[in-house]
Amino acid sequence: MENLFVFLISYVVVFIVFLINYIIKKMRGTLGYSKETKLLIQKFKLDRKRLDYNSLGIIFALVNSLIIALVGTISSMIDMHYLWQLAIGFVLLMVMIYLIYGGIGLILKRREKSNGKG
């Protein structure tokens, strides 16, 4: 129960930080130039003009908050030396980023293809 509480609190705090970052980027008009967006456009060869940057900004805030909160909670749950917790947390972080952003890229590519044909 304590771990769930830690996860929820950390998720909410990190999400608020990412949401503030999203609002600042939206006000400046730099949502399309975020590192996440550039990575997805380059890796999946997406059409920059067809992307909805407002929706992507919120999705990135949700996903990044989930990744950070989940990895932090799982790493702190492991009863090992701190170096092992850091190592496991780093590996988990890389795996989750790769899998989740790969999934987002595939979904965007599929939507781009279906919208192009229809």
Image (cartoon, grey):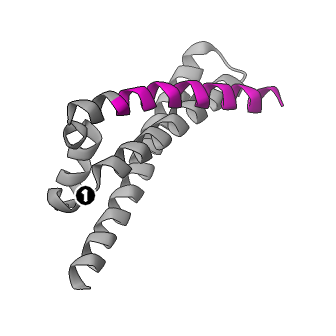
Q: Which residue is mark 1?
A: 51
Quadrant location, the N terminus: top right
Q: Would residue 2 be counted in the magenta stretch?
A: yes
Judging depth in this view, the residue of 94 and 87 nearest the camera is 94
Tag 1 secondary structure: loop
Q: Residue furthest bottom?
A: 118
Answer above or below: position of 82 versus 100.
Answer: above
- Which residues fall within the magenta stretch? 1-23
Image coords of residue 26 (percent x, y) = 29, 36
Image coords of residue 75 (percent x, y) = 62, 27
Q: Is residue 78 visible?
A: no
Q: Residue furthest right?
A: 1
Image coords of residue 61 (percent x, y) = 44, 38
Image coords of residue 66 (percent x, y) = 54, 39
Q: Would residue 76 be counted in the magenta stretch?
A: no
The part of the image, by quadrant, that contains residue 7 is top right
